[in-house]
Image (cartoon, helix red, strand yellow):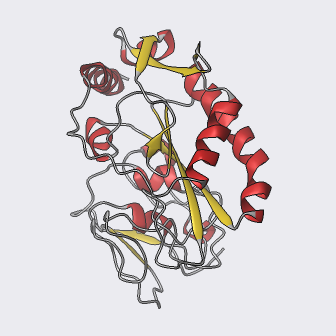
Amino acid sequence: MSKSWFPVIDLKACTSCGACIDFCTHGVYEKTKAPYPVVVEPDTCIDHCHGCGNLCPTGAITYADEDTIWTPLQGKAPQSAGCGCGESRACGSETCDCGGMTDEVSFGCTCCGETTDASVKNIVVDFLYLDLDTCGRCMGADAVLDAATDDLKDILRQLGYTLTVNKVNIQTADMAEQYRFVSSPTIRVNGADICADVTENACQDCGDICGCDTTCRVFTYAGKPYDSPPKAMIMDGIMRAVYASAAVKDQTLYVLPENLKSFFAGALVRNEKS
């Protein structure tokens, strides 16, 4: 923790996307004000952690007592690390223990797993979801993902890999487009969806959130459908990435699904009324 290091928000540049609040688990930001970033506990910020600043799409976050070469990314890859896809590494500090969106420091791209250091091999798991308070299948997928990655960490470490898990709450249509989000929940390993096809059925929980009919993901594994992915499915997806020849890059044209448009519109109306 630091008494002088904390995020400073440029309110003119901030778009209130909420990414910084979702990232930080140390209470630096006021959760009840989300998605508006309000720094309420600066003393709990981790010294020299640039995690929230690296995630800010507009470069609206700088840091008090900044004494490194780090500068706001503003949507650009950092000069010291990253890859051609334009994404940045999870955290700017080698000794960072921020414990936020990633559970281990990765010196590779948080999008595709590529790295500027040939000696470091990265497995990056992205968990994209709509809700972890109400939606049973999102909560179920989250719990299974934790169990699967816990089981594989030691194995991957012995094989010379780092494992990074990014958990991202997709809160708006803009965020959905940024992450090319097609269905909730989604689990990608080094950019590859562990489900080859998108199959959905009615989700009462998410319907209650937005006040409209909503469908969410069904995971098909070994010929059987599951509302939450089996642990073996996640572990299989991770191990396939270990032996893949290259990271998968989705080049298809992204179009926000109508189902998600309705969800975000309904959730916004409900939030404005509450």
Residue 144: x and y, percent?
69, 33
The quadrant in which the N terminus is found is: bottom right
Residue at 36 percent across and 63 percent down: it is 87
**Is residue 134 in view?**
no
Q: Position of residue 176 (x, y in %)?
A: 32, 38
Q: Is residue 111 left or right of residue 189?
A: left
Question: In front: 14, or 73?
Answer: 73
Camera-nearest residue between 65 and 73: 73
- The reply to whether residue 249 is visible in this rendering is yes
Q: Is residue 48 above or below residue 58?
A: below
Residue 241 in the image: above or below residue 64: above
Question: Which residue is located at x 41 percent, y 52 percent?
Answer: 19
| Left or right, 121 with reference to 51 | right
- Indicate the position of residue 230 as horizontal and vertical percent values: 67, 26
Residue at image position (59%, 46%) is 240
Residue found at x 43% / y 45%: 33
Q: x, y percentage for residue 199?
A: 42, 17
Q: Splitting the image into 4 quarters, where does residue 216 fall?
A: top left
Q: Is residue 192 above or below residue 82?
A: above
Total label count? 0
The C terminus appears in which quarter of the rendering? Answer: top left
